Image (spheres, rainbow, N blue to C red):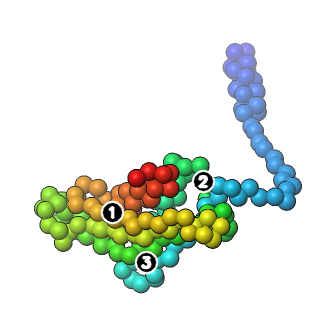
Amino acid sequence: MKTKLIYLILSLFLISACSGAETMVKKNWANKENTLVLVDLTPNDLALKDSGPALMNALEDSLLAHTSFVLSPDEGQYQLKYKVLEYVQGSRGMRLATLGLMESADSKLSVKVALYNKGKLVGGWAVESWLKDGVRTEDTLFKEAADDIVSHLRGGY
């Protein structure tokens, strides 16, 4: 008898655990006051081809975590245009082995950034990021550059 009661109670919990949502949207307006479009102007040459998208991913993460901007894929009030000027990946193993003393193993990233509001230039920055130790990966290089750019957007520096 107890097992039937336990199965009945478990069945009620499982049935009541189902949930859902339905949305119907009818609108003809768009709120673009704090929308931001990221535009990558990095050339498609072999040395820089992966650095532009890596910086975009780091920028998206940093913007979502530290600002109230809403990222838009097509159009928005603000445009953040960036161009990776230099990216040297370096050698993580050599940085680790030489404790960061060998300059040829360093990772470097140099980016030029411009912020536009409705097509008018409102700010521009040159951001450099470097990595001398072998403990952190190159992802840290892009994250630090993105955090620096977002700090400028928030009014820092």
Q: Residues within 10 Å of mark 3 (few under 14, many from 20)?
A: some
Residue drawn 46% across the image and 77% down it: 42
Tell me the kind of residue under disc 1: Ser
Q: Position of residue 1 (x, y in %)?
A: 73, 15
| Gap between marks 3 and 1 measured at Cα | 18 Å
Residue drawn 78% across the image and 44% down it: 21
Of mark 1 and mark 2, the one earlier in the sequence is 2
- Residue 23 relative to residue 108: left or right: right
Image position of 130 with respect to 50: above or below: above
Labelled pair 3, 1 in contact (Cβ < 8 Å): no
Say the numbered circle drawn on residue 129.
1
Residue drawn 14% across the image and 58% down it: 99
Image position of 156 with respect to 39: above or below: above
Q: Would residue 109 be seen by someone viewing this image from the given angle?
A: yes
Q: In terms of depth relative to the viewer, which is nearer, 44 or 7? A: 44
Q: Position of residue 20 (x, y in %)?
A: 77, 42
Q: Quadrant of residue 38?
A: bottom right
| Gap between marks 1 and 2 measured at Cα | 24 Å
Residue carrying label 3: 49
Residue carrying label 2: 69
Tell me the kind of residue under disc 2: Phe
Of mark 3 and mark 1, the one earlier in the sequence is 3
Q: Secondary structure at mark 3?
A: loop
Tell me the kind of residue under disc 3: Lys
Q: In terms of depth relative to the viewer, which is nearer, 98 or 83? A: 83
Say the numbered circle drawn on residue 60.
none
Image position of 65 with respect to 142: above or below: above
Camera-near label (3 vs 2) is 2
User: How many discs appear?
Assistant: 3
Q: Position of residue 57 (x, y in %)?
A: 49, 62
